[in-house]
Amino acid sequence: METSSRHCSEQLIHDLSNPAAAGLCPEMLEVAEEAWRAGDFNLAAEIYASQLAGLPQPDRGLCLRKGDALGRAGRISEALDSYCTAARLGRLRAEELRLLVESIAQTLRDKELSGLERKKSEAADRPGAKPGGDGSPQGGGGDPAEEEGPPDLFSCRLCKRLLSEPTTLQCGHTFCKPCLEDGAVTECLVCAYKLDKRHGQLFPLGFKVNVILGGLLDKWFAAESRARRLWLEGDSLWKTRDLETALEKYDRAAELAPFDYMLLGQRAELHMEMKNYNQAIQDGDSTCRLRPLWPKAHFLKAAALAKAGRTEEALQEYFFCVALRPDWSSAKLEAQKILSELFSSVFENSSLPAPLSACPKPSVLSSPGAPTAGDGPRPGSSQDPVLKVARNPPGESGAPSGVGPMKLPQSLSKLEFPCEDRKTLTPVLSSLPGPVLKRKSPSDLASYGPPSKLLRQGGDCLPQKPTAPNGRREVPTQLVDSSDMECSLCMRLFYEPVTTPCGHTFCLRCMERCLDHNPNCPLCKENLSEYLAARAYNKTCLMEEVLVRFLSEELAERKKVHEEELRELSNLNKEVPIFVCTMAFPTIPCPLHVFEPRYRLMIRRSMETGTRQFGMCIADELKGFADYGCMLEVRDVKFFPDGRSVVDTIGVSRFKVLSHGQRDGYNTAKIEYLEDKKAEGEEYVELVRIHDSVYDQAVAWFTSLRDNMKNQILSHFGSMPGKESDPQASPSGPAWCWWLLAVLPLENRAQLTILAMTSLKDRLNAIRRVLIFVTRKRAR
């Protein structure tokens, strides 16, 4: 079996013991290196074997190169023969065995792991994958989420465990409070929102627990939630070196959540630190049963086995760990160390082997007409009698003269390494400790579930709670109550829930209306001025997902009510919001300073509905506001920290009020839109003549103004619009008329009278009279 070069590590060029030895061909060694780089490991192995066959004394570096090539070719048994020969010549260092470990793990992964497992393992080989562990058996596992896939809905994305003291950030994502208080956490893991931490706490209120989510988790996952708190208490005690009390906390937590593989893994690490290796092995084995594809579980178990002196079993676990996660340098290094010791324990004190007898070159290097490779055993391979290792018992014929029979170390023989003439790695897996690894095919993987019972230190057993079929937490349906998820302001199911920095959750619209009147939380009265200034009203993602999953029908009904309200607010004929303030005209900008709570709500609703429009009328002592007005369209809104805003609007169209009304504190009206009556024939000709005459008169008046007055008008209203070729092109008439009406020194009532006219001719005549009046008045 050849392995593609893109999946292989860089070749280790082992130094030759005697580079100038007779029989070595530098050109052939270069060819072997080229074959390695091309992924043709069998050819590289044959070249190294032929070079060894021509030496009077075996070269240690060449034996290692041959072993590496055979390992990469999947011929593990033959590779071990070469490593044994090298071990007889000199102690094998751990770093020299990296490719052997990788090759065994690669073969294990290719032949035994399912497609899903292999896909997960190969993901670590992609560019940008995180490097392996840091070398510590206890802490080298990396992030458990790397092996476990997407986190459970109720898991913290930082620690991958059940949310404890759930705290929602302003970005809307929720994490454990202890996780956020960690000094290393400076931003949201999901959206990279920066945390304004000061003295370890979030400014200005600190990390506050989400009251609603905290209550739901305690209700739905009572035992696990309690176990998580005990677990965290144990973590704190561990940090203060009170190991015995920490272990008691872990034991109590494990009684409440015996199926929590991360908890058992953590307890295994504590047992390791306390040198309780047998208990650590038990917890490691239970963790492997619960999560057979979690590399850290096998790493923990291997570390405990190694500390207990059970190195062969530890080596098996390390191999399986590397097979699951090929980039884990810590696991590979530990396996290399154990292999080094196993080789050394047998060969360190042995005498050097006698010179190897000559052997024929492989067919690929022979001259034409030479026997092919199929005519006999490959020179230098395990079938070659010259280098036959651990095949013939002592004294059996077949060993070359002067070379003693070479056996694998007994501990290595026990491992039954995968070799090229085996169709399956079942013997290897069946020899691995623990029922997780004793399976005969990948299809059997599904049959391995959590153990029915877990051992405690006292020897008695706890019943194992079954996990969800998909490995995710399941919420008991009888515990789901919509009243637990109601807004305390509107007393309805949350819609677009938002959590304040003080930990209270409200509907987005409800909270905004409250903050319009008062910058304090309506429940705890905490000052939210900073929150109001930032206007970071992001929906609480976890609460939204909970509503979608568990109260979908109620949420759909709540959404229906909300949409009906929006449709009602969007009807710009039936109930138009009215801003009672000043005169406004079509096409003319009208900037507004909004500070009253009722108008904050009105502007916000006009934006939410998408209409971005509302009516502007002047006040009326009897009716509240005038019978005529102008629709304004919002172009931009700029908010101030205290909730005030500057709204940039422009006039759109005129309207007549049919009826007056109110809604939530602001005025509303039923209206009809006004359009100019069209003139035709002689009337149109007369209209154009008047239009041009009044326009020229308006230009003359504006030109006659003082420069400072003209500059003020231009800065506020902009330049005067040009004369239009068709004065009836717009339903509201020429834009310059409205610009002129806005800048002329007229009272609001006079402006309102002209605004209400639906005859362009009458409006032009009225403007002409005003121009004559102001011109004469200024002349006097």
Image (tube, grey):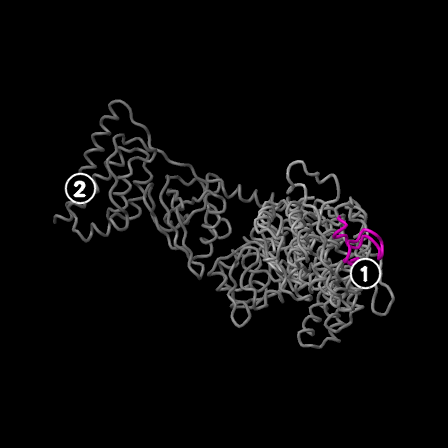
Where's residue 11, x and y in %?
60, 53
Position of residue 468 in the picture relative to residue 752 (left or right): right
- Screen quadrant of the N terminus: top right
Residue 733 sits above or below residue 397 on the image: above
- Displayed quadrant of residue 145: bottom right
Magenta stretch, main secondary structure class? loop
Q: Residues within 10 Å of mark 1 (few under 14, many from 20)?
A: few
Q: Nearer the viewer, residue 225 or 582?
A: 225
Is residue 534 found inside the magenta-colored segment of the image?
no
Label placed on residue 110? none
The span picked out in magenta is: 384-406
Q: Nearer the viewer, residue 129 or 103?
A: 103
- Residue at left offset 66%, top offset 74%: 239
Position of residue 204 in the picture relative to residue 307 (left or right): left
Q: Earlier in the sequence, mark 2 or mark 1?
A: 1
Where's residue 297, x and y in %?
73, 59
Element carrying mark 2: helix
According to the picture, the residue beneath numbered tag 1 turns out to be: 410
Where's residue 254, x and y in %?
78, 65
| Residue 585 in sight here | yes
Label placed on residue 772? 2
Element carrying mark 1: helix
Residue 253 sits above or below residue 513 on the image: below
Position of residue 150 in the picture relative to residue 408 (left or right): left
Q: Nearer the viewer, residue 484 or 231?
A: 231
- Residue at left offset 67%, top offset 41%: 363
Q: Nearer the viewer, residue 564 or 457?
A: 457
Where's residue 607, x and y in %?
46, 47
Question: Mark 2: which amino acid?
Answer: Ile
- Displayed quadrant of residue 314: bottom right
Question: Mark 1: which amino acid?
Answer: Gln
